[in-house]
Amino acid sequence: MNAADAGGAVKTGADHEDIESHYGVSNAFYREWLGPSMVYSCALWENAADLHEAQIAKLDYYVAQSRAHGKARVLDVGCGWGALLRRLVDHHDVGRAIGLTLSREQASWIEADAHPKVEVAVEDWRTYRPEAPFEAIVSIGAFEHFAAHGLPRAVKVRQYADFFERCVTWLAPGGFLSVQSISAQPADGEDVSRFIAQSIFPGSDLPTLCDIADAIPRELELVCLRNDRLDYSRTCNEWLHNLRARRATCIEKVGAATVEKYERYLGMSAIGFHVGRTGLLRFTLRRRA
Amino acid sequence: VTSDEFQDWLVSHLAAALGKPPAEIDVDAPFDRFGLDSAAYVSMSADVEDQLGIRLDVTDLYDHSTVRKLARHLASRGALGAR
């Protein structure tokens, strides 16, 4: 969907319906190919032997980048099925881990755990009002959904700036925000983003590195930036391999058309990261004290 | 499956997918010269997997981007027999 299709008010980013259309497909379906860790974002393959290890390494990387270890309150914007929230409280001595998601399916999954130190809210960061500041904020694989497909660039950058500015108000002085996002790296060739935007992630566009740089407010200082696109290529290959190996079971859960669409999407994504049409940015910002 | 048999199979497979006679498929031409889009690469990798009973990542088709190079790669992995 693009801004013009939304009708009435201009649509600025993915809404509940958009997010649910992707992430609410079926928890059981995702579990088949994401594996038990239920982490649906690029892994970190340095020193990892398999997908599970690489996902744990990724979670620990963001804990380290956001300096969240031992902190009292940590926020995860776009918390998925809660893997980072559980990692923070179970392995990193965090007092309270709070996650935001727009998917009710994901929130139910987390609530079913009833972890005393984990809290989840089905809420857009645009309307979220925390009761107290956070010492660290992480956002993994959500930033991609913050701007709608087809927005004028200035409006698109404004969405990212709005997110960063809110993080400034939620972060304690000196606190760290660490983000992972797919980025568009425009080049010649077919328009993969159109298929992704129309069929896979309705209501979303990808940021470029320039969009992100232009959106960072003066209160935040960049302390780390890396592009690990080959890590995402490998992660997509693993997911596609899992999906193919469990095709029959997946078809039972969501039907052949959806499985075929996901096979195509994961394969195209693997190619996009492999050839560099898309990047995988990991970056950390510090709120100036 | 020997390397030659695999190359013959892949040539027929590509010819059928492209609606061309197999004689027009050059085993040294990069796949992208046949006008394959990324969706076609995805199904091609799945078809090779089914044919050989092995794992083949779609990105391997970019790293080994002709019929002959792919056969050589698969042979080096032990997925194809000696010719």
Image (cartoon, rainbow, N blue to C red):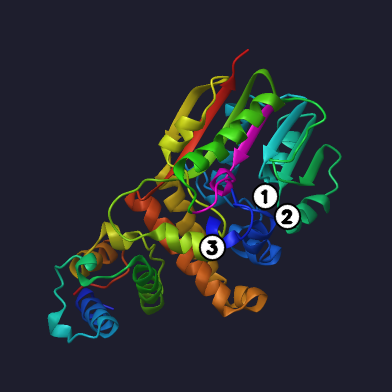
Quarter placement of the N terminus of chain A: bottom right
Subunit ID for the residue under disc 3: A
Region rendered in magenta: A135-149
Cβ–Cβ under 8 Å for marks 2 and 1 = yes
Which structural element holds mark 2? Answer: helix
Where is mark 3, residue-wise? Answer: A200
Disc 3 and disc 2: Cα gap in Å? 17 Å
Q: Which residue is mark 1?
A: A80
**Mark 2 falls within which chain?**
A
Asked if the residue under mark 1 is in contact with the one under mark 3, i.e. CB atoms within 8 Å, the reply is no
* Residue located 65% across and 51% down the image: A37
Q: Quadrant of residue A5?
A: bottom right
Residue lying at 73% horizontally and 24% vertically, measured from the top left: A70
Q: Which residue is mark 2?
A: A106
Q: Amino acid at mark 3?
A: Ile
Res A195 quadrant in image: bottom left
Q: Position of residue A83 (x, y in %)?
A: 68, 45
